[in-house]
Amino acid sequence: MTNVITDDKIPNNVNLSGDKRLQRALEAWQPKFIDWWKEMGPAPWNEKDIYLRTAISVETEGWANFDYVKMPDYRWGIFLEPKKEGRLHHFGDNMGQPVWDEVPGEFRNMLRRLIVTQGDTEPASVEQQRKLGETAPSLYDLRNLFQVNVEEGRHLWAMVYLLHTYFGRDGREEAEELLQRRSGDADKPRILGAFNEPTSHWVSFFMFTMFTDRDGKYQLAALAESAFDPLARTCRFMLTEEAHHMFVGETGVQRIVKRACELMKQEPNGDVRKAGGVDLPTIQKYLNLWYTLSLDLFGGEVSSNAADAFASGLKGRYKEDRYDEHKLVGSHFAMDVLENGKVIHKDVPMRNALNEVLRTEYIKDCQRGVDRWNKTIREEGIEHELKLPANKFHRQIGMWSGHFFTPDGEMIDQAAFDARRTEWLPNEADETYIKSLMQPVYERGKMANWIAPPIKGINGLPGDFEYVKLP
Amino acid sequence: MDKPSADGGPTRFETHPSRYKHWKLAVTGELATLTMAVDDEHPHKPGYELKLNSYDLSVDIELADAILRLRFEHPEVKCVVFTAELDRVFCSGANIYMLGLSTHSFKVNFCKFTNETRIYLEDASANSGLASLCACKGTTAGGGYELALACDETMLVDDGNSAVSFPETPLLAVLPGTGGLTRLVDKRKVRRDRADVFCTTAEGIKGKRAKEWGLVDHVVSRSSWDATVTERAKSLSAKQTVTRGPAVELPALSAKVEANGVKYRYVELQVDRTARTGELTVRGPEASDVLDFTTPETWSLHAFRELDEALLRLRFDFPEIGMIAVRTVGDPKLVVLHDELLATTTTGFAREIRLLQRRVLKRFDNTARSFYAVADSAQSCFAGSLLELALGADRFYMLIDGDQKIGVATSVANAGFNVMSSGLSRLGARFYGDPELATAVLQRGAPKPKSPRGAIALPPERAKLLAEHPAYKLAMSIEMIPSEEAEKLGIATIAADDIDFGDELRIALEERASLSPDALTGMEQSLRFVGPETLETKIFGRLSAWQNWIFTRPNSTGEHGALTLYGKPERPQFGWKRT
Ligand SMILES: [Fe+2]
Ligand SMILES: [Fe+2]
């Protein structure tokens, strides 16, 4: 049976039915994607009806279409924000010139690398999360997990669309390899470190969607500024979905925090673990872990690649329009750098510092989320503060990797770090404890003991709605 | 046992595994592992960090030392495996910031030295029964891939990400500087159109395609990596049949560095900075020197190791000394005795010495300075292996003395073993149009064992051992070819008597020192390497011509050049005119 690609099967606004080349590429790729989904996605749940949101057009009424659907039948679509005519380069060396509708030969490899690196994270997170359905704390959360999963699948489609349409044979090969690498695999790991860490329980899942998906938001936002117009338009549409993933993460952690506070008050001596909750110090450790893994994703603090990508107009800053100056020649960014083993504050040419500039925006955004968690703690009448660790703490990539810092940013030696490691980062006992809490709750409206219920349900529906139909 | 000597001067090329900062050498039975673990905080000169296993001269000096020691000190090793300590990066090539900070002459000499090291690695496999395997478990870029190209076999990890690459042209507007382009098509025989694609794709080629295109020999998964490395290394070592050894420990060279030169036991370099000239003097062996080939102190090894380092110091530390007069001092009979003994000793160690001599003499040919050999004293000793210096020099000046004490003598060392990069012997290159003249010189200079003409006051225990040795008889019966005849035979460029000689030589040196060093380099390299092209001549020729030209062009090193601006916020701007 031939696999026929139609507009109906794949909702799109890229004139798929009129694009023979794209059709042919997708006809070959789509069955491999489904095979990948069945092998590496949330396998046991493929036959279940799940209340999911599907984007079927980019109009306001079309991008959030709610209905029951079985995941393999989910209509992974290809959507780009509608084209704005007359768009010009608005930053970098080519400012004022018309943006590119085709890949410029000069930047073909750099662009392909950017797209493949972004694209690789999408299936990676589905793989990382594939077992979580077995231990969901509620049907509401189970459904949110799957919503995130199918949308990461759609993000993969979006990147594959770009590879297929603009990068010829190389693009088709890269699209195949996106399905061949595997998160955490010894032989073919995913490209970026954080996407090879196991997301083996729901505390990690919420931290991941809070912190790692937020990296995705900032990367997408920077690419949404791109002068390669199809990439910019693709990323802008993806950002709408990413917002939901971060909502899942931030509210997920907030509900765990809330429950921890409640249990502290219930237990005579405040022992949250004794009451079967996740205590605030343990939450802090998972925060430390996932936040720092996510900081790594922004790349080196001083980077010639970042300078190149900006200069050539391929990757801008977060909300480039907010800035007054868009060439960044001769301007500097004051930041901490390591020189001769010492941390000093120093001016770095702005273009080379753009990874750090983006990371700084990201850190502010994370802080806003942590502030809201602390507000919850205060509202519960508890005195405790969750904190983002220093950006130098526990880094594997960039200038601070190979050096050791406390969460307060104080430089220490490796022995001192190792001695206090389990104080700052989850240890095996923490993992064992958290996993012991992970018992599934599939009853409508019920919630696991370690997490508070959400304030409201999905799409205006009540909390006890049957988000996933179980026999 | 000699301890490694203390730091000897501005650029020290001799080192010792106990002082390595960038490599780890481990030997287990027939296999050696050289692990690249570049210490980013110890570059050759301050001003840059050696991130991601990038290398500079300090890294390459250690590599050269390690290969030398494997050849002499570890004859049991049949295969050396190159690997890296970093997980996702094998080697990211020459450090770009270092290149950006370096003078032109430094860059050229750096590239030349790394090339010579890699050729010596290839020579170990071709002639010494020491194979090499490059185990690239991660990104392998630029000079990292050039190291792989110099190995017998290369494996690349198949992790969906790691690639081999030559990003020099697309990223830096220069060329791979360590023979990469030539080895790609001439040695690995990668199809040239594919090589074209490869060399312009900054991120390189990975996985299946890297193998299909012949860029690597094996692509191997991470999980079967270690087992495959061992298996390939064992298979390579099983193929080695050359007898090596016995093992010796190389003694330290003990260089005495002075403001205007450097002094070793047998070799001395003195420069005159005002005149921009220098004198390189090589002493022959003393009668009291050890005369067998079981010790690394032997003149045949030690003097050539000293010459090797002196040439490198000349290149790196004395860039403005363009004209070098080369003299020798000693007893020609003793040089010939050493050459003949060396050639008839069948140990691997003796062969290793001859191969080292050959390499050092090539270093001499490839040094971009004007060399005039000068025989102007009765103590001069241009015989056998030292005659190669006169034959390799650009000119040879000989003084005609009344009693014909000054002359040259040939030995087995001139008869073909000591080839130049072109594959020709120096006599062969000298008489390229007329091979019979080379034969005539060898016949004229050949010892006449029936009629011994001399004797040497050897230490008694040596004399007993050697008296009946054929090499001794040969050496004692050599007949010097006096200057006038040497000129007729085509050995001397100019032979003159003492009325003319002094002025003749002085003017020649002064005149040479006044000519454009750039033009001289090009001219000398063109004339020295007459005859056929080989992989080596192509590598050095293209390095001298193309790479050096490109290095000085605005598109790479001008204000807006790609190399200048690498890592800076601005993008390069090219001038578009092609030649
Ligand atoms: Fe995504
Ligand atoms: Fe996401």
Image: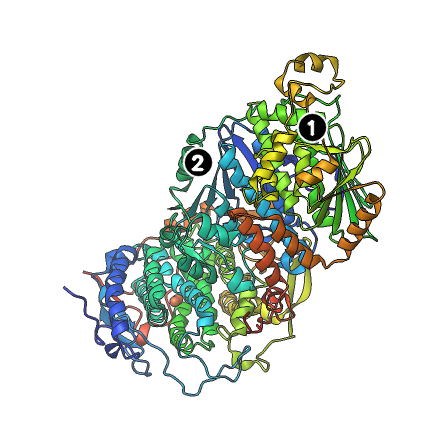
Ligand 1: does it lie within 8 Å of the C-beta at label 2? no
Instruction: Find numbered disc 2 in the image and state the secondary structure of the residue it sits on.
Output: helix
In the picture of the structure, the residue carrying the numbered disc 1 is B335
Are tags 1 and 2 found on a single chain?
yes
Closer-to-camera residue (A153/A242): A153
- The three-letter code of the residue at mark 1 reads Val
Position of B149 compared to B342: left or right?
left
Residue B539 percent location from the top left of the image = 54, 51
Closer-to-camera residue (A9/A266): A9
Q: Residue at x 51, y 34 (%)?
A: B127
Instruction: Find numbered disc 1 in the image and state the secondary structure of the residue it sits on.
Output: helix
Q: Which residue is drawn at 47% across and 71% down?
A: A106
Mark 1 vs mark 2: give the one in front. 1
In the picture of the structure, the residue carrying the numbered disc 2 is B233
Up/down of A21 relative to B419, above or below: below
Corner quadrant of residue B310:
top right
Ligand 1: does it lie within 8 Å of the C-beta at label 1? no
Q: Dot 1, how many residues are within 10 Å of its Cα: few (below 14), some (14-19), or many (20+)?
A: many
Residue A290 percent location from the top left of the image = 48, 58
Labelled disc at residue B201: none
Position of A464 compared to B334: left or right?
left
Q: Could you tell me which chain the residue with mark 2 belongs to?
A: B
